[in-house]
Amino acid sequence: MKRAKIIFLCLFLLGAGIRAIDVARPFDGSIREVWRECDVASIARNYYRESMNLFYPRVDWRGDGPGFVEMEFPIFPWFVAVLYKCFGFDEVLGRALAYLFSLFTLLIFFRLSRYFLPDLGAIASSLFFILSPLVIRMSNRLQPEGLMFACYLLAAYAFIRWLDDNSWNYYCIALFATALAILSKATAAHIGFLFAILILARKGWSVLGKIRVWFFAVASLLPAIIWYTHAYNFWLNYGNSLGLSNEYHWINWEFFSKSTSVPIIGRLEISYIWMPTGLILALFGIFYKRSEMVVKYSLCWLASVFIFYIIAARSAGNIALDYYHVFSAVPAALLIGAGAEEMCRLIPRRFFLFILIVVSGILALISGIVGSGFFGQSSKGLIKLFLLLGLFDALLILFLFPQSFGLQRNIMQKEPSLLKTLIFSFLAFALSATFLFEARQVRYDIIRPGYGEGMYECAKAFSSQIPENALIVASGGSRKDNQGYSIATNAPYMFYWLDRRGFNIFHEEQSVDTIKSYVQRGARYFIAEKPAINLKAGLESDLKREFTLIKECDKALLFDLTSRK
């Protein structure tokens, strides 16, 4: 027990260290989530500067209105604004807050894994969760997903403990955490499927006659219903939304005919969650531990998650929204831990297995981060890393179990058979390879160019040309996707970086006449992104003929709309 506590402390420090990598990174467009981060950052800044009324969040792309926006319950950006009030405006405070939520999430997962699994399985499960690329990405992003995920995991753990212990303490914790998770992000509402499956399986249909079950359902959903009804009025009155009413997320008939959502969902699950060799451990655990609670609960959890993925197929099958798949990381980690625990039953000397799992995981982490930089991200580089990792595992197993290969005899201790040792070796390599895949993806996510790189430099170059209180027009995205469904493409980054307010112009609306209509509403400058205006033939030359071009950078043009030619 003491040794296990020391190992879990080391695992926590490892997870905390990895999650701290990007905490000090500025909001300069160098990460993939630049759009969402700039929205949340601007809302926090507007709380700090304009009003701390929690129930009235404001965006910068507000046009000539007050900027009230339909969104999830804005408790996270409001907390960030509270930190600004206490310590002064510093963007790092928001990332630090998300980081603290991620550490709390780690601790809850440790409790969950140790509740379901013996020490070896819990260690393997926790190491997998620590290295999960999506979990790491969400750990310090200025997005509500960090708070939501912490509450989501706490709600699931407390609900399971309530079912097992019938404790009012766990009931209250589960109720509060569920309500806050759904308020923080509506995607967490699918946890209701998990709770329904578990309680009906454990208690039977008669549980539907219990008042506290219905109270739990109503009390956990009612705050979200009240908030989202209130927020919907912002959409109706001002036309501002962060992807709730201005985007179509749901399954449709195309899903059953020519939809690409299913293969994309599968690809995201394999590449970002299962890694994909983790499936080998998970299937091994499911087969041999199919009667145990860890497998039953994890499969129910996966079922509830995939119900959500199917219902919201257009978002879950969108590569740009890959972080929706973070929910799968928890049951996946538990199943991989179950497989690792069952793998270890093949070998009698448990202490050596502590060493094997932890050391191979750390080696995979080092290989994935350092080795990928040396060998590159290509398939050839990955093969070289696999060969090195396989060689290490083979040498380690030969050192630990020489008797199984006839290299040494020990008549005082029963050794595993050659077949068991070979099976164990294969599964141990699969586990190490899973850690390697995770570490390699983590490194790739860290160095991958952000969607806003280049535009940040343009914003810095344009800033001195635009007076502080001037309204601007900035390029947005397209209102519709290729299939004609609405998508949320209000681009917030230029407004946030320039610290200006104004209008987004969407691809379908780009014209000189539309720009003139914004001038009549008070717009004074137009930041035209070159890829956007190039979608319409002749638009750039028309703009240059009509308005004065005062600044140009690699990716955008700045026009003075008050100076006509």
Image (spheres, grey):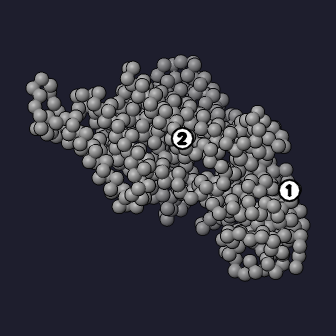
Where disc 1 sits, the SS reads loop
Quadrant of res 220: top right
Residue at x 85% of width, y 50% of height: 66
Q: Is residue 4 left or right of residue 451?
A: left
Image side of residue 275 versus residue 72, left or right: left
Picture quarter containing residue 424? top left
Compared to 524, does 172 lie above or below?
above
Q: What's the amino acid at mark 2?
A: Arg
Q: Quadrant of the N terminus?
A: top left
Q: Earlier in the sequence, mark 1 or mark 2?
A: 2
- Numbered circle sitting on residue 394: none
Q: Residue at x 45, y 42 (%)?
A: 131
Residue 353 position, x and y percent, is 29, 32
| Label 2 CA crowd tier, 10 Å (few <14, some 14–19, many 20+) | many
Residue 283 location, x and y as percent? Answer: 33, 43
Residue 293 can be seen, yes or no:
no
Q: Amino acid at mark 1?
A: Glu
Assign the C terminus to one quadrant of the image. bottom right
Residue 452, image x and y in percent? 64, 59
Q: Is residue 53 above or below residue 560?
A: above
Residue depicted at 49% across the width and 37% down the height: 15
Res 468 label:
1
Residue 19, numbered circle: 2
Viewer-side residue, 507 vs 474: 474
Foreground residue among 198 and 330: 330
Question: Is any atom of residue 498 visible in this view?
Answer: yes
* Residue 538, picture quadrant: bottom right
Look at 86% across and 64% down and name the residue there.
523
- Mark 2 lies on a secondary structure that is helix
